[in-house]
Image (spheres, rainbow, N blue to C red):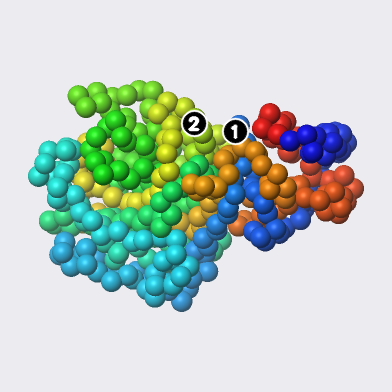
Amino acid sequence: MMVHSRLFRSFVVISSLTPLSLAAFQQVSNDRCNCFLTNGSRADYFTSHKFFDYREKSEYATVPALIDDPDDSSEADPTSDYFSTNEWIDNWTLQNWNNKASLSGGVSDATTLMVNSPNNVYFEKNNDPDADSSTFLTMRTARLEDFQTASEFESTVRDYHFLSARMYARTIGAPGAVTAIFTYRDTANNTDLTKVQESDLEIRTIDPPDHVQYTNQPSYTSLGLDVQEATRNVTIPKKRDWTNWAVYRMDWSPGATTWYINGDEVASISFQAPRDPSLLILNSWSDGGSWTGNMSVGKEAYLQIQWIELVYNTTGSSTSKRDDESCFNICSIDETEKIGTPVLLQGSASGILEQMGSFAGLVSWVSVLSMVTAFW
């Protein structure tokens, strides 16, 4: 957009002077932002922002006992009143489905009945020696004598059309589980591989603790052959592993999905990148098959989450390019000092001068803004 070209040239000149701290950017509420610009190798614009904070929920913290009957487990009540609040029900739905159909129909090589239960999603106190929160949200899976109890929740929004999803999380527990966050295109026939659209971040507890799996599904053909271009098995940078707290980020963009850990890009796959509106799902599960492994009876594994943050578009909102003049106040969730609170990167001319003070803070965005000038 030519109307902003002079403003962009000002950014380049100013940022060539001296870099200062992130504090140069003004923290703002979502209603001050027309759009959100992400950083990284693919800079994308999004129209909306949500932050889900599970760090201070002590009033809901309780670890429920396992339910050893599959039907009772499926029909269990939520573990606290929090899951009846608008904060939860407006955004997420607890799942209670099972895999009986795939066991009987030969759709997978699962060997164990898996039952999702609301009883396995709960808050617990953070008793880490160096705890940086009071609580976190836990998603549990456990192997009982007759079945695998598991947990899953999915977004109420079913038409995300590109997003950047982040969670501050860790995985702990026994071999034989998968913990995941992924986009999913819900179709009438999800066994038809030609209709599958899905981007996955998966941690398998049978893998070495420094390995994470990233995939644009399907990762296999109807003949059972692996599709190598669809998946990457990645070593976590800087000698860390998935038992440590880390920020896991997944950017679903037009033509590619890119993943980061603690800000470091670890994988990007353009092959089979999802194209159509999808929902977002998190789970912790096992079915005794070759992908998850077979968890020993009496063992458990957990996905523990301190917060989840999304910037996104939905069907009917702007694309991930800056293609309309309504995107004037540009915000960031990457350049903030306070997780969950966006900062203003660009607004009115007077607002920019007020933010900049002594020409501060804009240098880190020169490369990002340079990449997206083709969109203007």
Q: In what quadrant of the picture does the N terminus appear?
A: top right
> Of the residues shown, which amino acid type is indicated by label 2?
Ala
Determine the residue located farthest toward the right in the rendered image: 358
Amino acid type of the residue that numbered disc 1 sits on in the rendered structure: Arg
Q: Is residue 227 left or right of residue 34?
A: left
At x 68% / y 46%, what residue is drawn?
327
**Residue 278 at x, y percent in the picture:** 41, 45
Q: Does the image show residue 303? A: no
Q: Is residue 265 above or below residue 175?
A: above
Q: Secondary structure at mark 1?
A: loop
Q: Position of residue 276 (x, y in %)?
A: 42, 39
In which quadrant of the rendered view does residue 142 lie? Answer: bottom left
Q: Mark 2 or 1 closer to N-term?
A: 1
Residue 349 in sight:
yes
Where's residue 151, x and y in %? 30, 56
State the residue in front, 306 or 310: 310
Q: Viewed as shown, does residue 328 lie left or right of 84?
A: right
Residue on which the image places disc 1: 42
- Mark 2 lies on residue: 256
Quadrant in which the C terminus is drawn: top right
Q: Residue at x 48, y 68 (%)?
A: 87
Taking depth in this image into account, of 341 and 62 the one nearest to the observer is 341
Residue 122 image point, x, y percent: 37, 66
Image-based side of 50 in relation to 71, left or right? right
